[in-house]
Image: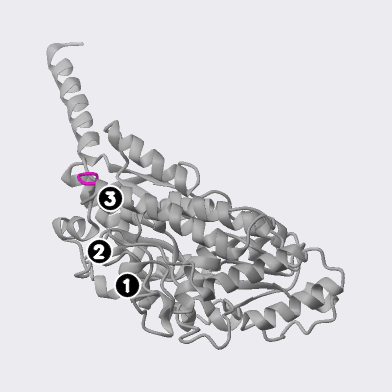
Amino acid sequence: MNIRNLLLSTSIAATSVWSSQALAATEIEFWHAFTGRLGDLVAEQVETFNNSQSDYKVTASHKGNYSETLNAGIAAFRADEQPHLLMVFEVGTATMMAAKGAVKPVHEVMAAAGADFDQDAYIGSVKGYYTTTDGQMLSLPFNSSTPVLWVNRDALSAAGIDPDTDLSTWEKVGEVLDKLKAAGHECPLTTAWQSWIHLENFSAYHDTPFATKDNGFAGTDTELSFNSPLQVKHIQTMGDWAKDGKFIYAGRRNEGGANFRAGECALFTESSAGYAGISSEAEFDFAVRPLPYWSGSDGAPQNTIIGGASLWVMEGHDDDAYKAVAEFLNFLSSTDIQAKWHQDTGYLPITAAAGDKTKADGFYDKNPGTDIAVIQMTAKEPTANSKGLRLGSFDQIRGIIDEELEAVWSGDKDAQAALDSAVDRGNKLLRRFEQANP
């Protein structure tokens, strides 16, 4: 090869390398806690975003359950190996807020990227959980759900019960459980996420404080208060049902979901997001009803509160990466993507526009009951008792609550003793958190 050709080939090679570098997409990492059907739907969202443009590429990774994903994110930050986006369940909100230097507030990310970002577009009862007292969004709501009552209509019919019977109150639920038990049904009622549904949401739905200081929103010097007479009454009633074989406890998370989807249980209190699994697996006629409440309780039903998770932006990355993050978050919030996510999963639409589109699409008409979660969350303006919970060390506090509730279900403790103990033990953790985060 002569000198002229050698220089020409070298120049072409150099230009090719430079062009590939210039055109390389900015890559960001997204760590989440989803498997199964929900994991598939997240992968679909990421693929849709990546295929919609060539400037950015998102890589999604499953890091275990909610607690494990949070812990993985914390460990990665300490090792300076943090992802750009971390899914954190709602009880980890106070922990993330206290993680000074670890997170970059969403409103700052969007502003710096010059993104078109309207915080007022998000549903208030969802947005409020993840914003400061002056309304600045800290993390982006992603998978927000609320508990509902799932009904195996075939099981009710088999027990001689009208599948459309009124189940709006716990008194009426108790009557149906009596009939199911008398008919020989082995699992009249089960639940998922017992603390979230039967204490946290129960309290909000009955406009009763779970903790002082507006459930922690007004300060870290909060104290737990979920041992009031109404809360004790509910837990004791469930304990009595457990003793009689009318309430079957399956586990602390969503172990009961498998029993319900298999057709073994007649009634099931679970997240609205149970829709993804139930609609794809159940081989029986099912329905979704509002979460029951105790009649005669002042303010009930108020509104339920959200569960699920939000996406936190981690510190330690460059401006190009944060522009990619802003683009991806806006994509996830877009009306078409949010409406599809809501319809596929049962999670709440995080924007009013996505809810409106779902209604206009006729989805609620074709799938009766799928709008119940939205109605439960938006029918009434949230109060200080029903805005949500913002408590330090809440994941550990939930573990304490689970332990004490299990003592009630097994008959080892009555509800008053168990809830008093949970409050006392939980308050000790709150004091440690307060001292560590003055």
Q: Does 220 sit left or right of 158 as displayed?
A: left
Q: Do the residues labelled 1 and 3 touch (CB within 8 Å)?
A: no
Q: Mark 1 points at which residue?
A: 122
Magenta residues (range): 98-102
Crowd class of label 1 (few under 14; some 14 to 19; many from 20; radius 10 Å): some
Tell me the CA gap for discs 2 and 1: 10 Å
The residue labelled by disc 2 is 137
Tag 2–tag 1 contact (CB < 8 Å): yes
- Residue 11: image quadrant is top left
Mark 3 = which residue? 313
Q: On the picture, is 339 further left or further right than 164? A: left
What's the distance in space between the residues labelled 2 and 3, CA to CA?
Answer: 12 Å
- Mark 3 surroundings: few (<14), some (14-19) or many (≥20) residues within 10 A: many
Circle nearer the viewer, 2 or 1: 2
1 or 3: tag closer to the N-terminus:
1
Q: Is residue 100 magenta?
A: yes
The image's colouring method is one colour
| Residue closer to the observer: 215 or 164 | 215
Q: Which of marks 2 and 3 is nearer the N terminus?
A: 2
User: Could you tell whether 107 is left or right of 383 in the image?
Assistant: left
Quarter of the N terminus within the rendering:
top left
Secondary structure under the numbered disc 1 in the rendered image: loop
Q: What element carries label 3?
A: strand
Q: Which residue is drawn at 38% across and 51% down?
A: 428
Which amino acid type corresponds to the residue marked 2 in the rendered image? Met
Mark 1 belongs to which amino acid?
Tyr
Residue 386, by quadrant, is bottom left
Q: Position of residue 102 (x, y in %)?
A: 24, 44
In reply to whether residue 381 is colored magenta, the answer given is no
